């Protein structure tokens, strides 16, 4: 009996040790990927130059990167990260891209980082422009601002964060009204509950199919919604009605995602179809982010989700080049057919959002492995 108990204890210790080792591996991978990005884009204030166009570094692609960087800072608080964030936010004067009058969700995405930064060291200047911007939009009667599902990730967490930060429930009331309009009303509803996935926008609804006849659900587009739901739930009391509604959608999507994960851990760019079958990082990383969070919070239960996370991590970790560059990132677009083919060596038109997605997935998975406690000890 004693030998049996000893064997069980040893097995448990080895399991914990292996998990801690994997957490360190995940963190080091995240650091490597982020270091590559910060060295390549050493000046966070510099405009981006893609496709013959110049855009400010507060555009949505870069804002998604900062979502990932702030998540990395939360488990690995290095001053160089905060300095990079502050230089960027100060340069853009804590203001949405295109100013306080914008109603474009893509312009508002950067505010997720501004609010995060305010919570670290509160300063009214960090919230004033976004407060002005959101209140202007809330004063309108329109409900179709988020007619494409990417917008849900870009803007909805901003409202959720503002609601929690200020204690003003009107922000979340408004966000849920617009979310439900996109979910249920635009083109008959962008969320197709039967399959558990979202049509990308009002132009791509049933019968939007691939050449094999399967419904076309874009991986990264659904990843944006999945991540947005998580980011909003993380701001809400679990007993609130909004949390309960979002949890239902999260569970529906989670079950659907389990069904379509590939044997190698990736999800196809077209989730339920063999069209454009192949490795793709951005959607897979966002699904890893959501599932890891769900398991950590106890919203998801069962070994099947943990296996899905383990396989997804192995998949996206295989995308890392020796330099820290990420392969298999689908470039910008609005459907699986865009920016094809997706390959290991191809540089996407924008590198930043792929890096952000990777960092979100990696940090959430690291926390699932118990990495946060280990990191705190190593930082002391």
Image: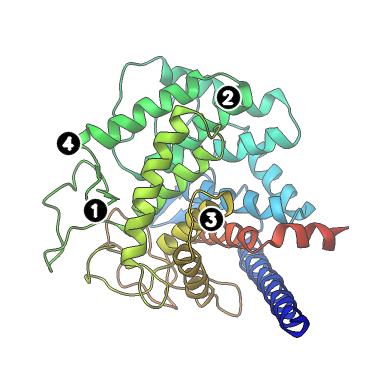
For marks 2 and 1, the one nearer the N-term is 2
- Disc 2 residue crowd, few under 14, some 14–19, many 20+, Cα 10 Å: some
Q: Residue furthest right?
A: 380
For marks 4 and 1, the one nearer the N-term is 4
Q: Which residue is mark 2?
A: 129
- Disc 4 residue crowd, few under 14, some 14–19, many 20+, Cα 10 Å: some
Q: Are marks 4 and 1 in contact (CB under 8 Å)?
A: no
Q: Any mark on residue 147, and which?
A: none
Q: Which residue is mark 3?
A: 295
- Label 1 secondary element: loop
Q: Any mark on residue 188, and which?
A: 4
- Residue in the foreground of this view, choosing between 294 and 190: 294
Q: Residue at x 56, y 27 (%)?
A: 162
- Marks 4, 2: nearer the viewer: 4
Rounded to the nearest angstrom, the CA distance separating label 3 from label 4 is: 32 Å
Q: Which quadrant of the structure image shows residue 136?
A: top left
Color style of the picture: rainbow
Q: Which residue is mark 1?
A: 195
Residue 12 visible in the picture? yes
Q: Position of residue 218 (x, y in %)?
A: 29, 57
- Disc 1 residue crowd, few under 14, some 14–19, many 20+, Cα 10 Å: some
Q: How many numbered marks does the figure carry? A: 4
Q: Quadrant of the N terminus?
A: bottom right
Rounded to the nearest angstrom, the CA distance separating label 1 from label 3 is: 22 Å
- Residue in the foreground of this view, choosing between 121 and 290: 290
Rounded to the nearest angstrom, the CA distance separating label 2 from label 3 is: 36 Å
Q: Position of residue 164 (x, y in %)?
A: 59, 27
Q: Which quadrant of the structure image shows residue 219?
A: bottom left
Q: Quadrant of the C terminus?
A: bottom right
Rounded to the nearest angstrom, the CA distance separating label 4 from label 2 is: 35 Å
């Amino acid at each position: 009996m004693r030998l049996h108990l000893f064997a069980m204890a040893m097995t448990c210790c080895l399991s914990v040790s292996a998990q801690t080792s994997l957490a360190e591996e995940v963190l080091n991978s995240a650091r490597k990927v982020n270091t590559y990005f910060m060295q390549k884009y050493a000046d966070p204030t510099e405009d981006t130059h893609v496709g013959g166009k110049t855009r400010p570094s507060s555009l949505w692609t870069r804002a998604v990167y900062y979502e990932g960087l702030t998540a990395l800072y939360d488990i690995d608080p290095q001053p160089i990260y905060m300095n990079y964030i502050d230089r960027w936010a100060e340069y853009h004067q804590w203001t949405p891209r295109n100013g306080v009058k914008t109603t474009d969700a893509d312009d508002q995405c950067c505010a997720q980082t501004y609010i995060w930064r305010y919570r670290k060291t509160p300063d009214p200047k960090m919230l004033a422009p976004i407060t002005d911007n959101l209140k202007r939009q809330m004063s309108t009667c329109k409900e179709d601002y988020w007619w494409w599902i990417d917008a849900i990730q870009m803007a909805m967490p901003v409202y959720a964060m503002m609601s929690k930060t200020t204690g003003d429930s009107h922000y979340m009331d408004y966000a849920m009204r617009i979310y439900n309009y996109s979910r249920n009303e635009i083109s008959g509803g962008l969320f197709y509950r039967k399959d558990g996935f979202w049509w990308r926008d009002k132009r791509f609804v049933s019968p939007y199919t691939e050449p094999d006849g399967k419904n076309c659900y874009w991986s990264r587009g659904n990843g944006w919604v999945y991540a947005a739901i998580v980011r909003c739930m993380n701001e809400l009391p679990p007993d609130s009605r909004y949390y309960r509604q979002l949890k239902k959608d999260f569970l529906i999507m989670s079950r659907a995602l389990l069904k379509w994960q590939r044997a190698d851990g990736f999800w196809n760019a077209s989730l339920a179809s063999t069209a454009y079958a192949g490795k793709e990082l951005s959607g897979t990383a966002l699904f890893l982010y959501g599932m890891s969070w769900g398991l950590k919070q106890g919203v998801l239960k069962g070994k099947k989700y943990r296996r899905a996370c383990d396989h997804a991590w192995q998949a996206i970790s295989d995308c890392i080049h020796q330099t820290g560059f990420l392969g298999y990132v689908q470039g910008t677009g609005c459907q699986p057919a865009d920016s094809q083919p997706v390959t290991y060596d191809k540089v996407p038109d924008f590198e930043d959002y792929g890096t952000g997605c990777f960092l979100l997935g990696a940090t959430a998975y690291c926390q699932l492995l118990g990495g946060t406690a280990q990191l705190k000890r190593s930082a002391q």
